[in-house]
Image (cartoon, rainbow, N blue to C red):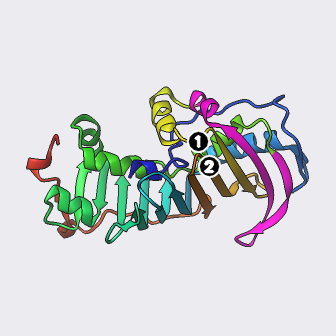
Amino acid sequence: MRRLAPALALGGAALVAVAGCGAQGTSSLGNVKLAAAEAVQQSVQKAEAVTSYSGDVVLEATGGDKGASKIQGSLLYQSKPQLATDIRLDTITYGGQNVPGGARAILSGDTVYVKSELLNKFAGANKPWIKVSLADVDAKGQAGIKGFMDQVQQFDLASTVKLLTVSKDVKAVGTETVGGVDTTHYSGTFPVAEAAQAIDPAKSEQLQQDLSRVKNVKFDFWSDAQNLPRKVTLSGSEQGNTFNLTAFFKGFNEPVEIAAPPADQVGDLPKNHVGN
């Protein structure tokens, strides 16, 4: 399922200065006109300062010998008073086959709660939810949990926008309304190789693996008057392999409710699965 998320494997990307990269166009939204590249940079800075948000994501991929794949879901995020996320993947289709029940993951502090019929069957769990500490996920090689968490952690507001900063051809193409909010629409491309060099080395290899069959990614990006990202689309095509991602973001710095599942619905990962 890791191949399903080429456009979402953006965690840990570093902010890249793009002044003087030849980007074209300006934003006329609000009182200050910004060069397109500068507007994208400012959007990254704004996104990094956001302490909570919600979003909706759809990712579709085709090509290869696995057939069509799709992930559709939503997320809640907060960084204060402690880091917490609630990811719901309502639709997971891989190779033309639906994953029954979808999946959900709640990260609260240093504990991960995962609900997945497929994962529970694989792990032999007897409760709807599996509880695992982040330390165990990282240190004990929990392949199933780790793989799912990699998917979960790829849903990220600031990191998604950060990759756009390596673009050398970003330009403003107009103004549109997204979710009832006035936005400026930007468009451009970025080369995968440069994007991989721009991010945390620990994430670079995974990004290159996820995008191994795509050289360049086309993007469209909509930001509001405060330079907050409201919508991002990413797409790529190479030798018959294609992917298309659409992400909507909203509820910036508004209260979100992220709670652990009821205790009687939660079980630990079976001991016979530890270390597998």
Position of 228 relative to 212 (above/below): below
Residue positioned 72% across, 43% down in the render? 189
Q: Residue at x 64, y 48 (%)?
A: 47
Residue visible at 61% across and 36% down?
192
What percent of the width, then of the height, locates residue 49?
Answer: 62, 46
Marks 2,1: beta carbons within 8 A: yes
Amino acid at pointer 1: Val
> Given the image, on which type of amino acid does mark 2 rest?
Ser
Residue 83 appears in the picture as rendered: no
**Does residue 8 appear to the left or right of 41 in the view shown?**
left
65 and 224: which is toward the camera: 65
Residue 65, label in figure? none
Badge 1, how many Cα within 10 Å: few under 14, some, many 20+? many
Rendered-image quadrant of the C terminus: top left
Quadrant in the rendering for residue 216: top right
Closer to the camera, 43 or 26? 26
Give the overall secondary structure of the magenta segment.
strand
On screen, residue 227 versus residue 103, left or right, reads right
Q: Is residue 103 left or right of residue 85?
A: left
Image coordinates of residue 60 in percent, x first then y, are 53, 60
> Quarter of the image holding residue 114?
bottom left
Q: Is residue 214 visible?
A: yes
* Residue 39 picture location, percent across and down: 79, 44
Is residue 100 shown in magenta? no
Range of residues picked out in magenta: 171-198
Identify residue for label 1. 214
* Residue for badge 2: 237
Sequence-earlier tag: 2 or 1 = 1
Residue 193 magenta: yes
